[in-house]
């Protein structure tokens, strides 16, 4: 469901002219996000009609938890933010032209236990907060007056996850109007059974729904259209569809196809049209790609026949200050930065993500592992007072698993199966975490790097149940899609091996167990093994790079995230390559030095006595700072993918070093500190390929402000991400600056939030005032669509005020 400015245009016009929306062909989903009302707290009888409760106007997506204060009365697992109950309602007008058609409301995700009513009629409940769903409104619509949709979200069990989930209608909502004979939600399946550079076979299955009482003679046409607008395949059939539904299947061939891959993610438009009596009655457009994937037990992963190492990162849904109600533009910025580091794969941990993230992965060239669950029928530990501290909560999805799991995982696969970026379906993350909750006698022996408690716990459930459930979930996935392998990320491999859990999977993910690769590859020669979750330590990548049969590493994590925190005041997890603001950490540059192809160099300094790697989650600690006490002995480390690196202090060379000969492939120099300018140059074949400089800064004096977007179209909401940097009078970044900054906005825009990247700050995210971290701050500005100038001013006592101007044309 690709969102374009036209979605916003239609909705804007519909608010001004109610008849406009009804007059359009709404076979395509139209955003239904504007002008909702919200009430925090439960309302007795709210679904039945009017009430005297105070409501406030909100636009969706909306996350109410992120708007509340941090407090240690809540859970460390979910970021010390509350859950609760919230109500939403929206009133709209239905036009007589809708009569005889089918009207649906589609929610991309509501956290959680959502219940929906239209004009007091109950439509249903969806416990899972990460699953998309829709309801038909048609039979309950009022054509003589107003219609009111009401939604209740119940997140009372606030400690119900091991990370921050947010609360409310935090993803997009769409309105869809269809004729009685139509192509239903997720009812197109596209696949490419055989692919080469010369030709590709394509298969398209279309499920046609007939909601009338009579057989319908229908024309079904499928067009595959390239980026130039040329139809490269046109397939059509005439079919008779009895009341109910009928699947229509097409096979075609494309000559000289543009193959989708991570470097050139070529896409096609798949257009499905239904005609009746010579007129078009429905159309469905989707973006698809032509590519082949294969996992081999000895050779690893192949994309379009080419061996490819999956250089992956795990990511969660949130974006710090915005909670989980994240505009698409935020992920565009984040993904661009990750791509620059050489990242080519994303693990969407540990749940289905927002619809637009799959579209972005298709367009930007990321290979995706889509994941369903973090727990099955039994609850995991969700820590309340800090990781492994005190008594954990056992609340969570497991309460609904037995009733909903098959439907949830099936819907996950149907929703996103046409995305070329997706290469694996994961049915679970660390479900086999030893003793949390499953156990086995084998835990008394061997090496178990992740385990709750000590050894076998006979009062815990037996691990054999893992195999039974996995078999059922795999069956459900394959009933929808057999073109991709099914996987799971295993934490207790030694235990799962004893009960046959891995044998139920097509490919087997190992979390933090690189040491088992050689042993298990030999012991289970038909098993396809890869790293599904891994630490930052150098040896973790070496286990992938040096073993042809290991195809992947997925770092924990690509980006810092809310929740899964330590003791108060820590409220976020700092494991990422990027911080919560999307700013690069030193570890980012190290990863870039081993993953990226484009020449790069980076230097950071630390005192010689400082330690290096400190375990599987170790991060490189060198910072881009050249302000140290006089007579300090410094260690300067260089992260580079160039053959050689040369360090200069105030123009004087301190020597050229070979990357391949350096310990850990990190050229390093011991330097007697003197203030000034420290520069490194990277060379390939003796030619300078890149350089990087850090300078001694004086005291903080100025503020540098830059916006990623400054020009916006009218009548559309736009997002500008404004980076704020504190500098000295010469424009040098002041790394240790923690000045309190104030962001003022004049014009038709609002400040959505300020993000410093801090994992422990308890400042209100909606406040226009926030302290910088490492001299930096990120501001999220959203335009209203009203033409004119918008001035963003950033100030702080003792610093020179700075502004940036945004323009809505």
Image: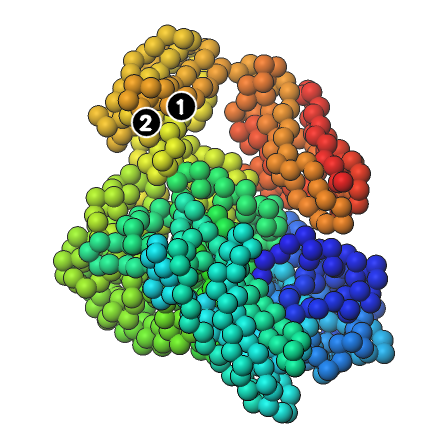
Q: CA distance from mark 2 to mark 1?
A: 8 Å
Residue 261 location, x and y as percent? 40, 50
Residue 182 location, x and y as percent? 61, 77
Q: Is residue 389 above or below residue 150?
A: above
Residue 649 location, x and y as percent? 39, 11
Q: Residue at x 28, y 43 (%)?
A: 541
For mark 1, does the 10 Å Cα neighbourhood hold few (<14), some (14 to 19), or many (20 or more) residues? Answer: some
Give the numbered dot on residue 715: none
Q: Tell me whether the residue at label 2 lies in contact with that at label 1, contact meaning CB atoms closer than 8 angstroms.
A: yes
Q: Can residue 276 be seen by looking at this rendering?
A: yes
Quadrant of the rendering where the N terminus is positioned: bottom right
Nearest to the observer: residue 777 or residue 163: 777
Residue 48 location, x and y as percent? 76, 78
Q: Can residue 605 be seen by looking at this rendering?
A: no
Nearest to the observer: residue 100 or residue 113: 100
The structure's colour scheme is rainbow
Q: Is residue 339 above or below residue 511?
A: above
Quadrant of the rendering where the C terminus is positioned: top right
For mark 2, does the 10 Å Cα neighbourhood hold few (<14), some (14 to 19), or many (20 or more) residues? Answer: many
Q: Is residue 1 left or right of residue 152?
A: left
Q: Is residue 236 left or right of residue 599?
A: right
Determine the secondary structure under disc 2: loop
Determine the secondary structure under disc 1: strand
Q: Residue at x 65, y 40 (%)?
A: 720
Give the numbered dot on residue 642: 2
Q: Residue at x 68, y 46 (%)?
A: 718
Residue 630: image quadrant is: top left
Nearest to the observer: residue 24 or residue 652: 24
| Residue at numbered disc 1 | 690
Q: Is residue 41 above or below residue 386?
A: below
Q: Residue at x 45, y 24 (%)?
A: 624
Ranked by sequence position, the earlier of labels 2 and 1 is 2
């Amino acid at each position: 469901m690709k969102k374009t400015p036209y979605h916003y245009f239609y909705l804007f016009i519909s608010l001004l002219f109610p008849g406009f929306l009804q007059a359009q062909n709404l076979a395509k989903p139209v955003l239904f996000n504007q002008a909702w009302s919200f009430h925090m707290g439960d309302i007795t009888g709210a679904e039945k009609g009017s009430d005297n409760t105070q409501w406030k106007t909100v636009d969706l997506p909306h996350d109410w938890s992120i708007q509340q204060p941090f407090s240690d009365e809540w859970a460390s697992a979910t970021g010390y933010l509350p859950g609760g109950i919230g109500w939403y309602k929206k009133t709209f007008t239905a036009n007589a032209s809708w009569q005889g058609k089918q009207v649906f409301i589609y929610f991309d995700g509501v956290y959680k236990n959502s219940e929906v009513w239209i004009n007091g009629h109950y439509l249903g409940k969806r416990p899972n907060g990460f699953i998309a769903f829709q309801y038909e409104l048609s039979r309950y619509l009022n054509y003589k007056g107003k219609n009111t949709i009401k939604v209740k979200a119940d997140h009372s069990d606030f400690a119900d996850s091991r990370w921050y989930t947010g609360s409310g209608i935090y993803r997009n909502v769409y309105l869809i109007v269809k004729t009685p004979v139509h192509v239903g939600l997720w009812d197109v399946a596209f696949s490419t059974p055989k692919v080469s550079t010369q030709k590709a076979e394509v298969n398209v299955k279309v499920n046609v729904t007939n909601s009338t009482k009579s057989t319908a003679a229908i024309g079904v046409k499928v067009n595959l259209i390239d980026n130039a607008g040329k139809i490269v395949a046109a397939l059509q059939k005439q079919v008779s569809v009895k009341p109910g539904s009928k699947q229509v299947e097409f096979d075609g061939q494309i000559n000289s196809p543009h193959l989708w891959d991570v470097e050139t993610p070529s896409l096609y438009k798949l257009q499905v049209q239904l005609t009746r009596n010579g007129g078009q009655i429905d159309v469905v457009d989707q973006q698809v790609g032509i590519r082949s994937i294969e996992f081999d037990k000895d050779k690893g992963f192949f994309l379009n026949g080419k061996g490819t190492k999956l250089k992956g990162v795990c990511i969660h849904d949130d974006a710090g200050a915005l909670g989980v109600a994240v505009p698409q533009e935020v992920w565009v910025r984040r993904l661009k930065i990750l791509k620059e580091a050489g990242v080519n794969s994303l693990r969407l941990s540990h749940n289905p993500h927002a619809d637009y993230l799959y579209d972005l992965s298709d367009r930007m060239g990321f290979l995706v592992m889509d994941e369903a669950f973090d727990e099955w029928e039994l609850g995991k530990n969700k820590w309340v007072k800090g990781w492994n501290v005190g008594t954990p909560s056992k609340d969570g999805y497991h309460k609904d698993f037995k009733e909903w799991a098959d439907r949830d995982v099936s819907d996950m696969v149907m929703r996103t199966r046409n995305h070329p970026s997706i290469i694996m379906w994961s049915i679970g993350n660390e479900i086999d975490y030893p003793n949390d909750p499953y156990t086995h006698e084998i835990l008394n022996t061997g090496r178990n790097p992740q385990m709750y408690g000590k050894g076998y716990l006979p009062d815990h459930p037996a691990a054999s149940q893992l195999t039974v459930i996995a078999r059922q979930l795999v069956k459900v996935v394959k009933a929808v899609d057999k073109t991709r392998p099914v996987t799971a990320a295993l934490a207790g491999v030694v235990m799962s091996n004893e009960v046959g859990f891995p044998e139920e999977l097509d490919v087997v993910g190992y979390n933090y167990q690189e040491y088992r690769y050689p042993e298990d590859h030999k012991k289970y020669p038909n098993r396809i093994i890869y790293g599904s979750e891994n630490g930052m330590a150098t040896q973790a990548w070496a286990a992938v790079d040096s073993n042809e049969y290991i195809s992947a590493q997925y770092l924990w994590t690509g980006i810092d995230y809310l929740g899964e925190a330590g003791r108060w005041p820590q409220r976020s997890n700092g494991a990422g390559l990027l911080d919560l603001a999307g700013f690069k950490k030193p570890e980012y540059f190290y990863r870039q030095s081993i993953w990226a192809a484009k020449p790069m160099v980076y230097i950071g300094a630390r005192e010689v006595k400082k330690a290096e790697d400190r375990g599987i989650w170790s991060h490189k600690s060198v910072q881009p700072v050249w302000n140290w006490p006089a007579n300090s002995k410094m260690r300067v480390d260089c992260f580079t993918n160039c053959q050689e690196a040369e360090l200069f202090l105030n123009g004087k060379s301190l020597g050229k070093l070979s990357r391949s000969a350096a310990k850990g492939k990190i050229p390093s120099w011991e330097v007697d500190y003197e203030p000034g300018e420290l520069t490194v140059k990277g060379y390939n074949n003796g030619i300078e390929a890149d350089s990087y400089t850090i300078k001694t800064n004086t005291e903080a004096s100025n503020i540098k402000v830059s916006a990623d977007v400054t020009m916006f179209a009218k009548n559309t909401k736009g997002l500008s991400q404004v980076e704020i940097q504190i500098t000295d009078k010469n424009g040098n970044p002041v790394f240790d600056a923690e000045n309190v900054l104030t962001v003022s906005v004049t014009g038709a825009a609002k400040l959505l939030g300020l993000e410093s990247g801090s994992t422990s700050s308890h400042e209100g995210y909606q406040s226009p005032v926030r302290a910088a971290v490492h001299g930096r701050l990120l501001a999220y500005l959203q335009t209203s669509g009203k033409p004119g100038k918008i001035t963003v001013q950033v100030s702080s006592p003792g610093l020179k005020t700075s502004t940036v101007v945004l323009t809505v044309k």
